[in-house]
Image: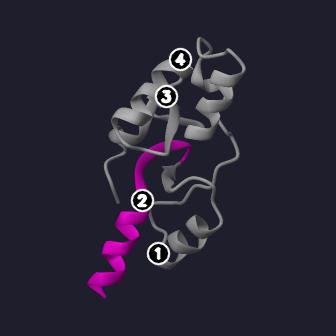
Amino acid sequence: MSDPDKFILDAETTMAQASEQLSAKNLTSVLVCQGSTLLGGLSVEDCMKAEQGGRLDVSVKSYANRRIKTIAPSASCREAVALMAGAKENILPVVDDKELTGVVTQGDLLLQVYEF
């Protein structure tokens, strides 16, 4: 599991700021949180839609996909692989009682496979 800080944007971040941060961190998706509460996910494609619509001044919570897949801290690597395989985002939030506790990335899963 990865430290989620690299993948988190505050809900009040603008779409312009989100686009800049995704580019600077070389990410394709991030998580939108209000405090430690996960609100949803945001992708590069969402930022491009905001730019095309002239809405870069809008907060990311307006564009956050609220129906992203999450996983419990007690879940197995196999469960994480199954969930991530069908997800749009390449990160899987680890959520315990609606609070974000971590993130599983594709890289984390690859490392687990090679440790077996």
The mark nearer the N terminus, 4 or 3, is 4
Does the CB distance between marks 1 and 4 fall below 8 Å?
A: no
Front residue of this view, candidates 51 and 73: 51
On the image, which quarter does residue 87 sit in? bottom right
Q: Residues within 10 Å of mark 2 (few under 14, many from 20)?
A: many
Residues drawn in magenta = 97-116
Tell me if I can see residue 43 in this picture: no
Amino acid carrying label 4: it is Thr
- Amino acid residing under circle 3: Ser
Residue 23 falls left or right of residue 87 = left
Residue 6 in the image, given as x and y percentages of width and height: 34, 40
- Residue 49: give x, y in percent of width and height: 68, 30
Tag nearer the camera, 2 or 1: 2
How much space separates mark 1 and mark 4, taking CA atoms?
35 Å
Give the spatial CA distance, label 1 vs label 3.
32 Å
Q: Which residue is mark 4?
A: 14
Q: Secondary structure at mark 3?
A: helix
Position above or below: 50 against 100: above
Q: Are marks 4 and 3 in contact (CB under 8 Å)?
A: no
Q: CA distance from mark 4 to mark 3?
A: 9 Å
| In-front residue for pair 77/50 | 50
- Check disc 2 and report the residue beneath it: 105
Coloration of the structure image: one colour
Nearest to N terminus: mark 1 or mark 4: 4
Tag 2, which secondary structure?
Answer: strand
Could you say which disc has been placed on residue 19 in the image? 3
Q: Nearer the viewer, mark 1 or mark 3?
A: 3
Q: Earlier in the sequence, mark 2 or mark 3?
A: 3
